[in-house]
Image (cartoon, helix red, strand yellow):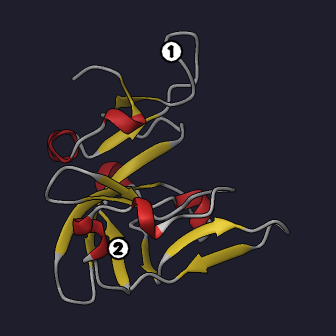
Amino acid sequence: MRDKQIWELTASDLHDVGVWCFPMDESVEDECTVRPCVEEVGLAMIVRAEFCDADGTRYLGYVHWSLVEHIGHRQPTLFLNDGTAVSFWGGIVKPSCDEASDEAKRISFPITFKSEPLLGLTPMVGVLEGMYYLDSNDQIFCLSIG
């Protein structure tokens, strides 16, 4: 498996490799480059996770591994059946329901997630009530969907 930009990852990539790291050195194109990780190396990582919506629909996705229970640190992302990645953290960009696909609009909140205990990493669990972003006062805001 080769290096990829994080937005190029697919559900198939996560099935094949459960942990990807951000090398952050001269060997990579930029800070968005991820590489399959076969051992815990002390770098920023994303870890395969299972998501379950309020209707019981399960999705594969990932979270940024962090012991800090903060949506901006964990940045949960799931993959829809059509392969579209849905991130629940927008940073300073307020999410827009208008841009969401019909399949994304069918996700029922709340959504729970749990990362897999791969490479000895502590599993992370969480509950998502909507799409999160930072408002103009740098406060985390949740935009409820549906």
Vertical placement of residue 79 versus 71, above or below: above
Is 81 on the left-hand or right-hand side of 70? left
SS of the residue under disc 2: strand
Q: Position of residue 131 (x, y in %)?
A: 50, 71
> In the rendered image, which quarter is residue 79 located in?
bottom left
Q: Position of residue 25 (x, y in %)?
A: 58, 17
Residue 29 at least partly seen: yes
The local crowd at label 1, few if under 14, some if 14 to 19, many if 20 or more residues have their Cα within 10 Å, is some
Residue 37 at least partly seen: no
Vertical placement of residue 24 versus 9, above or below: above
Q: Position of residue 3 (x, y in %)?
A: 34, 21
Q: Residue furthest front?
A: 98
Q: Quadrant of the C terminus?
A: bottom left
Q: Nearer the viewer, residue 82 or 62?
A: 82
Q: Is disc 2 in contact with disc 1, using a CB cutoff of under 8 Å?
A: no
Q: Quadrant of the N terminus?
A: top left
Q: Amino acid at mark 1?
A: Glu
Q: Residue at x 51, y 26 (%)?
A: 23
Q: Residue at x 28, y 77 (%)?
A: 107
- N-terminal of the pair, mark 2 or mark 1, is 1
> What's the distance in space between the residues labelled 2 and 1, CA to CA?
30 Å
Q: Position of residue 145 (x, y in %)?
A: 44, 81
SS of the residue under disc 1: loop
Looking at the rendered structure, the number of numbered marks drawn on it comes to 2
Residue that carries the numbered disc 2 in the rendered image? 113
Q: Nearer the viewer, residue 45 or 5?
A: 5
The local crowd at label 2, few if under 14, some if 14 to 19, many if 20 or more residues have their Cα within 10 Å, is many
Q: Which mark is residue 29?
A: 1
Q: Nearer the viewer, residue 19 or 105?
A: 105
